Image (cartoon, rainbow, N blue to C red):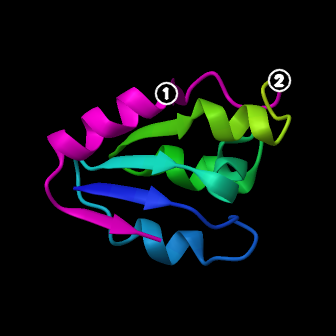
Amino acid sequence: MLHTLTASPFKTDLAAIVRLFAAGDDVLLIQDGVLAAIEGTRSLEILQKAPISLYVLEEDIVARGLSAQISISVATVSYTDFVALTVKNPQQMTW
């Protein structure tokens, strides 16, 4: 399943959302959700403990001026990669 996180981790209960992830799920951070990929944050720590593949949309990182702050442990993807993730995962949930 592809989970797309659009909201800021400061405005959501990320720990509750993560409990709904299953092993092998893909999680894509877009819009204000990219804030969860900032190095050293509690949000990133929560996501890294989950048995998921974690991605962040490059265009949204650049739009927010966060390129230097995003953890290198999170895979950065383009819109083309976003489409590939949606094709790979017929089931999707947006948070």
| Residue for point 45% across, 47% down | 28
The image position of residue 73, as x and y in percent, is 57, 25
Residue 74, image quadrant: top right
Q: Is residue 82 above or below residue 86?
A: above
30 horizontally vs 22: left or right: right
Figure quadrant of the N terminus: bottom left
Give the camera-side residue of 39 and 55.
55
The image position of residue 20, as x and y in percent, is 33, 72
Q: Please, what is the three-letter code of the amino acid marked with disc 1?
A: Ser
Give the camera-side residue of 37 and 87.
87
Q: Is residue 8 magenta?
A: no
- Within 10 Å of disc 2 (Cα), the crowding (few <14, some 14-19, many 20+) is few
Counting the numbered discs, the total is 2
Bounds of the magenta span? 69-95
Give the camera-side residue of 82 and 55.
82
Q: Is residue 79 above or below residue 89?
A: above
For the residues labelled 2 and 1, the Cα–Cα distance comes to: 17 Å
Q: Which mark is residue 45?
A: none
Q: Which mark is residue 78?
A: 1
Judging from the image, what secondary structure is the residue with disc 1 in?
loop
| Residue for point 76% across, 69% down | 10
| Residue for point 40% across, 49% down | 27
The image position of residue 63, as x and y in percent, is 77, 39
| Residue for point 63% across, 21% down | 72
N-term mark: 2 or 1? 2
26 horizontally vs 4: left or right: left
Q: Which mark is residue 68?
A: 2
Asked if residue 93 shows in the view, the reply is yes
Q: Please, what is the three-letter code of the amino acid marked with disc 2?
A: Ala
